[in-house]
Image: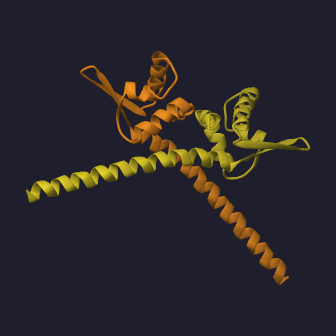
Chain colours: A yellow, B orange
Amino acid sequence: MNNVFSALADPTRRAVIERLITGPAPVSELHAPHDMAMPSFLKHLGKLESAGIIRSKKIGRVRTVHIEAAPIAAAEDWLNRQRNIWKGRLDRLSALAEHLEKESNDG
Amino acid sequence: MNNVFSALADPTRRAVIERLITGPAPVSELHAPHDMAMPSFLKHLGKLESAGIIRSKKIGRVRTVHIEAAPIAAAEDWLNRQRNIWKGRLDRLSALAEHLEKESNDG
C-alpha cells in the first residue's frame, strides 16, 4: 500500500495510469506526451512496476505496458472505507442535532 | 494531489487518519499507540498538515487535531474515475467477446 500511494504521488505517473487504463501501450507511445528524457521516464515506469501497478512484456523490439487493476482498487478501497466512516460520523452528528432540536422544542 | 498521495504512503500516517476519521483527538492521544519518539511523530503530523489532510488547534495546553475530508475525497475521486474507465473497458471487451461468439455460432 505504501508503494502504491507513493507511486501515485507524481503527475507523470498518474498521467501514465490515465493512459494505460484505456488499454495497453508501447513504452514509446507512453513516453511521447512527456517532455522528459527516456531514462527519467523509464524510472517512473520502474516505480509503477515495483508498486505492481503496471507490467510490461517485450515482443520483438517493442515493449508493451499494461495496467494491473488490483493495487489501484486496493488504494481506492482504503480511501472509500475512510469516506464511509466519515459519512457515518456526519450522519450520527446530524441525527444528534435533530434529536437535540426536537427535545428543545418539546421542552 | 501529489502531497495527498505522498502523505498516504506511510502506515503511521494512515493509522492517524483512521483514528481521526472517527473524531478529533489531542496530539498525545494520537501519539500513544505509536512506538516512536514524539519529534518523529510530529514530523508525520506535519506532513499530513502540509497536504491539507489535518488541521490542529491549541486550546490552553492541549493541541487538538481534526481531519479535513476534502483532500481524501479528491484522492478517492481520482482513483474512482480510473476504476470506472477500467470497468467501462472491461464491459466493452466483454460485449465484443459476446458479439464475436454469436457471429461464430451464426456463421
> Which residue is the extreme one toward the left?
A107
The residue that appears at 52% across and 23% down in the rendered structure is B35
Q: Is residue B3 visible?
A: no
Judged left or right of residue A100, residue A23 is right
Above-or-below relation of A81 to A43: below
Return the x and y of residue B29 as percentages of the image width and height: 39, 28
> Which residue is the extreme one toward the right?
A60
Judged left or right of residue B64, residue A39 is right
The picture quadrant where one finds residue B31 is: top left
The residue that appears at 49% across and 24% down in the rendered structure is B44
The picture quadrant where one finds residue B107 is: bottom right
The residue that appears at 66% across and 50% down in the rendered structure is A21
Return the x and y of residue A37 as percentages of the image width and height: 73, 27
Return the x and y of residue A10 as percentages of the image width and height: 60, 33
Q: Is residue A40 visible?
A: yes
Along the viewing direction, whichever of A87 and A36 lies nearer the viewer: A87
The picture quadrant where one finds residue A30 is: top right
Return the x and y of residue A38 as percentages of the image width and height: 75, 29
